[in-house]
Every structure is written in structure tokens, then in C-alpha cells.
Amino acid sequence: MVEAKACVICSVISVGLLLLVILLPLSFSYIDYYHYGLKQRKSTGSVQSDRVYTGGRYLNGPDMTFIKYRADAHLVHLDDVGVFSDGGDGNVGLSFIIDIDFTYKLKKDEIGQLHRDLAKAYESVILSRTNDAIKNSATSVKFSDYFNNRKNLEQQLREAVQTRWDVDPPMHATLGQFHLGRIKIPETVAQKQLTAKIQVEKNKKEEFLQKALLEREMTSVEVNMINLEQDKLLMSARANANFHTAKAVAESEKIRNNAIINGTSTLLTALGIDSEEHTTAYTYIRTLQNRKNLGFRVSYLTDDNVLKTKSS
């Protein structure tokens, strides 16, 4: 009887030890350093969201485990996000495609609320809200700013994304790095842009040609005005010169004639010629003598032999 009891006790102890060896390891739950954890009952699937566990080993019992959320940064790469730029005056701008890279981290203190609100669907909801925020914000940015003002554009898109995440129900996440990547313009849009640029350059060329033509016409008018002014000055100078020359010739002729008259009068007085007949004869002979085509000469009647005096 005693031996039978001893056998039963040994069997119970053996089973207990066996169960302990089996169940003890199963009672420990582990969380890596890059995870947050919420307790979850295996048998029912219910989650205890009131406490957030960090990396470590926990003795929770064989029926308990952890549902895990990432504690490190989530890296997201968005390819080919279709956006519209600001077209100005209420018009829809150009359509093109951009790439976005960003990181985010879940807020530790809000993991329980995150599980209650979204559970594991939070990633798809975050991606959806991010796309909406980027597309809505992009419509207020001019196309040229995507190339000339990228830093401010990135900040604008980042703030738009974080604001969209904070709308109820919030995403319980904080945006980290945010980078605007490649900007890809569809071929049709690029062709339209090129055509528009070419047309602008053609318009500028035509405007330049018109200005050049106008400048040449104005220059031609100014040259004609200068030439006319020059001709006017030359004609005026020639007229003045001719006038003064004629005046000088007339003055010299007047002085010469006065000298001849005075000299002749003095000569006639000195010779004692006082009759009109003799005076007329002398004047006639002198006139004949001064004619160049007549071979008649009286030496004492030449102009050189006439006493010349200045008129008073």
C-alpha cells in the first residue's frame, strides 16, 4: 500500500515536472528592441491595450503572447504620385509625377489607442492620407517652384502631411525625414511645355526685330535731320561768304573808282586842263588805253601813273 502511494506520488511529481518543463518556456514572451508590444490572449485573441511593453522577456503565462508594432522608423518610398501644379487664375495647372521618400515613427504612449482605432491597417491608412495631403497641397504650388524652390516646397508638403495625419482619428505617428525625389514630366506635357517655350522665344525674336526695325528707321530720320542741318549750315555759310565777298569786291571797286576819280581830277588840275572838251578827250583816250584787246598804249596815261589817293 505504501509502495503504491509512493508510486502515485512519484508519478504526480514526474508529471508536474514534465508540465513545468513544457509550460515554463511557453510562459515567457519576448519583445525585440525594435518592437512595441501589447498583451494578447491566445485562446480568445483579445488584446490588453492599456499598457505598452518594450523590448525584453516577460513571464505572462502560456496563454499570453504579444501583438507587436514597430518601434523603429518606418521607411516609405512613394513612386509616381500624380499631382497638378497651380495654373494661376483658378485654372488647373500641369499634371506630372513626383517621387516622395519619408520616414515616420509610432508614438509609444499611443500604441494602445492606435490598435483600438486602426490595428494593423494603420500603414495603408497612413499611405492614403499622405497621398491625399501631397496632391491637395501640390495644387497651390507653381510648376516652376518644383525646380527653383524645392526646399520650401518640401517643407510645405511635409507640413501638409503631418496636418492630415493629425485629423481625427489621428495616425498616432510622427513624421521624420521627408524628401522630394524625382520629378517626372509626361512626354505630352513636356512637348506642350517645349512648344510654349519655343513660341515665347519666337515672340521675343519678333519683338526684337520690330524694335530693331524701328530703331533703324529712327536712326535714318536722325541721320537725315543731321544731313539737312549740315546742308543748311553749308548753304548759309556759302551765302554769307558770297555776300561778304561781293560786298568786299564792291567796296574795293568803289575805293578804286574813287581813287581814279580823285587821281584824274588831281592830274587834270596839275596839267591845267579845265575845259570840258579836253577833259572828255582825255577820258576817252584813257578808256581806250585801258581796254585789253586794243593795241593802244600811252605810258603816262596808265593807272600806274595816276596819283592814287584815298577818298575822304
Image (tube, rainbow, N blue to C red):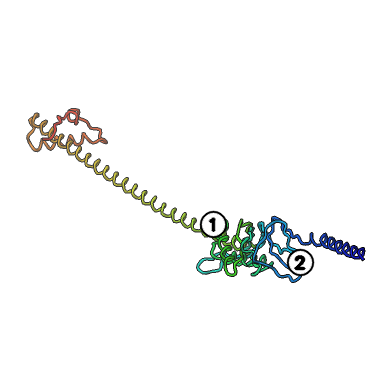
Residue drawn at (72%, 57%) of the image: 57
Report x, y in % for residue 87.
54, 66
Q: Residue 152 carries which label?
A: 1
Q: Where 33 sits versus 84, above or below?
A: above
Secondary structure beneath dot 1 equals helix
Report x, y in % for residue 283.
15, 36
The answer to the question of whether label 1 and label 2 lie on touching residues, with beta carbons closer than 8 A, is no
Residue drawn at (32%, 48%) of the image: 232
Tell me where residue 9 sits by quadrant. Answer: bottom right
Looking at the image, residue 147 sits to the left or right of residue 211; the answer is right
Tell me where residue 263 sits by quadrant. Answer: top left
Q: Where 233 sits versus 171, above or below?
A: above
Q: Which mark is residue 21?
A: none
Report x, y in % for residue 227.
37, 49
Looking at the image, residue 58 sits to the left or right of residue 222; the answer is right
Report x, y in % for residue 137.
56, 65
Mark 1 is surrounded, within 10 Å at the Cα level, by few (under 14), some (14 to 19) or many (20 or more) other residues, namely few
Q: Which sits earlier in the primary sequence, circle 1 or circle 2? A: 2
Mark 2 is surrounded, within 10 Å at the Cα level, by few (under 14), some (14 to 19) or many (20 or more) other residues, namely some
**Which residue is identified by label 2?**
63
Secondary structure beneath dot 2 equals loop
